[in-house]
Image: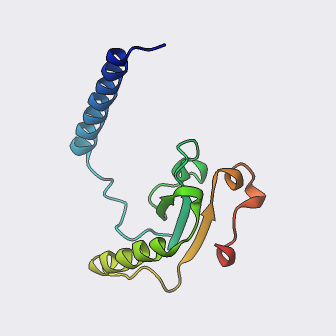
Amino acid sequence: MVSSAKTKEMKMDFFESLIERNAEFAHTGINPKLKMIPSRQTMIIGCVDPRVDPMELFKLAGEVAIIRNVGGRVMPSRFETIGILRVVSRVAGQEVGAGWDPLCFNTQTAASPIAITTPRSC
């Protein structure tokens, strides 16, 4: 069993690595080819399961907006998030919403490409 002192040390090491990673990102900056509005006008609503990263799962690079929650479900709070995204996107010159395609997935559906939820049934 790991002692509480060792656990605390491991957490601090991890947080220090996050700070270093952030400093590296701050130094290199955001890819200037990426735009505020995703190029594919698609929003993925996915599960927070860390084993299933939508960027890796779908081999993405700034092409879609990603919202993650428990179970990858669309619930009333997601509509609030989407509403806020609409406001923010107006600043970038294009409103999120009309003409966009939703895609939902969770850990179970991610393991089977056939089971990815269609835009009509999110």
Residue 81's place in the image compared with 98, above or below, is above
Q: Quadrant of the C terminus?
A: bottom right
Residue 42 in picture, x, y percent from top left: 53, 71
Residue 23 in picture, x, y percent from top left: 22, 38
Q: Quadrant of residue 4?
A: top left
Residue 31's place in the image compared with 102, above or below, is above
Q: Residue at x 35, y 66 (%)?
A: 35
Q: Name the outermost residue toward the right.
A: 114
Residue 11's place in the image compared with 105, above or below, is above
Q: Residue at x 58, y 65 (%)?
A: 73
| Left or right side of 53 for 34 | left
Q: Quadrant of residue 20?
A: top left
Residue 83 in picture, x, y percent from top left: 39, 79
In-front residue for pair 75/3? 3
Image label count: 0
Way the structure is coloured: rainbow
Residue 50 in picture, x, y percent from top left: 52, 43
Q: Residue at x 26, y 37 (%)?
A: 24
Q: Name the outermost residue toward the bottom.
A: 98
In-front residue for pair 54/4? 4
Q: Residue at x 26, y 49 (%)?
A: 29
